[in-house]
Amino acid sequence: MKSVLLRIVVLLAVALAAAPLRAEDGYELWLRYPRVTDAARLAEYRAALPAIVIDAQSATLRAARDELRRGLNGLLGAEVPISARAPRGGAFLVAGTPASSAVIRSLRLDEALRAAGDEGYVIRTVDVGGRRATVIAANRDVGVLYGTFHLLRHLQSHASLAGLSAVESPRVERRILDHWDNLDRSVERGYAGRSLWDWDALPNTIDPRYTDYARANASIGINGTVLTNVNANAQVLTPGYLRKVRALADVFRPYGIRVYLTARFSAPMEIGGLRTADPLDPAVRAWWKAKADEIYRVIPDFGGFLVKANSEGQPGPQDYRRTHADGANMLAEAVAPHGGIVMWRAFVYSAEEPTDRVKQAYDEFHPLDGRFAENVLVQVKNGPLDFQPREPFHPLFGAMPRTPMMLELQVTQEYLGQASDLVYLAPMWEEVLDADTYARGEGSTVARVVDGSLEGHRLTGIAGVANTGTDRDWTGHPFHQANWYAFGRLAWDPALSSAGIADEWIRMTFTDDPAFVAPVRRMMLGSREVAVNYMTPLGLHHIMARDHHYGPGPWVTGGRADWTSVYYHRADTLGIGFDRTPTGSNAVSQYFAPVRDRFADRRTVGDSLLLWFHRVGWDERMASGRTLWEELVHRYSAGVDSVRAMRRTWDALAGRIDGERHAAVAQRLATQERVARWWRDASLLYFQQFAGKPIPPQYERPARPLEFYTAHTSDQIPDF
């Protein structure tokens, strides 16, 4: 009998050892909290954190308490008791403010708490009556919540508690996700299902997912959400919708998140019965004041308005021969008594076709510096065109010293493979944040413009166009979660490195296994350059398919010129590229020296932005020694080869994480290879018409003739 039982036990142990890792669908994002597998580290955590002390008298402190319970119970593999009072013996974790915690009040953390500010926190290991205490202290409850997530992130990364000490505060005040969500639940440039906001069910039905959305944002320091599309619908400002917005605001508030709405400039006419929306008309100004008063009665902590005006057909102040400042200041006046702000986008299109599209925002906004109200942020995209795979930094950064500038990034991948391509965007954002504008000499980085330190602005902000939807994994691709995560981390601290952020995310989302972390980090950090190579190498831009923007379309022509591809690449038998030097459009003049001089000189601009600023002959030699045509072939081919290498890297990691997510990523990488081949083959065949040169023999040939690709207009990958 004993031998039979022994055999059963042995067989069971073998079966358990061979069993796959727990099934995962990506819903938990980076907040998974599996039990720590390192025995020594687990013992360290259990010894240091055997009890939680928090007096959760507010909704925000209850959120912190619940997260500590969820996180520590999971990571430590045992239930950790929670109490409002410190235990009589043994180590403990205490979280709170001086107002909510007698223990923290007794620790004399005044200097550190002053450095932490309103949203920051202090994490220390201290001695309390001969006992070891891990402390999360803050001035306000939301800081306790942010500190809670910091500590849990530390534990999820399996880092030692020895010497743990942090005083952190956000460098940027408004850290906001912009949702391009419509009231019918469609999402403009969304690739992860429908809008999260179920307007038909609100306000009576509150989806639990709203709370998980708020948890995820709070964990990375995001403190604002614009619920509606910049191509706005005035109906969201009506009483029925405001009650629905209030229901969302009530869910988000404990997590430090304020709601904002997009304001359609013509709303006074569409829902207010006025005959004009002229921002200098007294009746229009009175209407907006009354509407703001109404909103704040419903949602007292409403954040304010985001506005897209006189762009891509949207109404705006220029319809009445008024300036952007006139329009923004009218709305700013309406929300100012309530502490609200206006975020006025600088992404504009004139009615007339410009000589160079990328100059327009600067031309329209630079003369308005100092004319905006103090509660207005001018929201500027990272580059002067439109979220392309690579652009130079926007010349407005540093050019409006009397106006707070808000950086707008696109987390959703409109131009970078949409739902299919693994492209980690933090290196792109790091590139722009670190760019030196030289507005006040060397060191005048875009990050310093945005965080207000360059000009002393107190109102600061960073916005990211969200990539979330109703897909179970939130973002439609397991790795697109990393871009949501990276946006929040960089909005909190623009000095963080994309490598460090990737390392955190991998460990929290997948595993702490070094054999997995290291190759995946390398793959992520190289993925943006890989995409640039197979889409828009050497400074090419805006050569995607028309309308849906998925796949190549360098042949796109017809209609408004600056909405076509040929307007930007200007390829002919002599060469390719847009001359933006003084001999061309002189867009370089919008930058400060020495940036403008570097961009204007063919010898110093570098390969990465060459064709953005210069027109180059097909036979001109590049730094590599190859001709321009040969370099173009090389870059496109390298992009495809790199995706294949990414596939090999990922395939070799099978078994190190759960099979479900590994298979999902493997499938998408296979699709990405097809996308890369599509871009390479179509683009090279098209440009070959003008270069008149063969593809060198060492490179793979396109699978189909050019006509096959130009005839394909859908957003489905062609069968080649």
Image (cartoon, grey):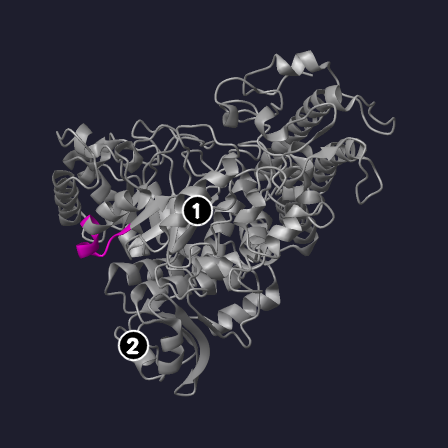
User: Residue at image x 12%, y 29%?
Assistant: 273
- Most extreme residue toward the front is 583
User: Within the magenta stretch, is there residue 336?
Assistant: yes
Q: Quadrant of residue 530?
A: top right
Res 605 seen here: yes
Nearest to the observer: residue 452 or residue 296:
452
User: Residue at image x 44%, y 70%?
Assistant: 50
The amino acid beneath tag 1 is Val
Report how far apart the C-alphas of labels 2 and 1 lie in the structure: 39 Å
> What residue does disc 1 label?
380
SS for tag 1?
A: strand
Compared across the picture, whether 263 is left or right of 174 comes to left
Q: Position of residue 365 (x, y in %)?
A: 40, 46
On screen, 407 above or below 660? below
Q: Position of residue 578 (x, y in %)?
A: 63, 34
Q: Nearer the viewer, mark 2 or mark 1?
A: 1
Residue stretch rendered in magenta on the structure:
334-341
Count residues near mark 2 (Cα–Cα under 10 Å), then give few for <14, some for 14-19, many for 20+: many
> What residue does disc 2 label?
98
SS for tag 2?
A: loop
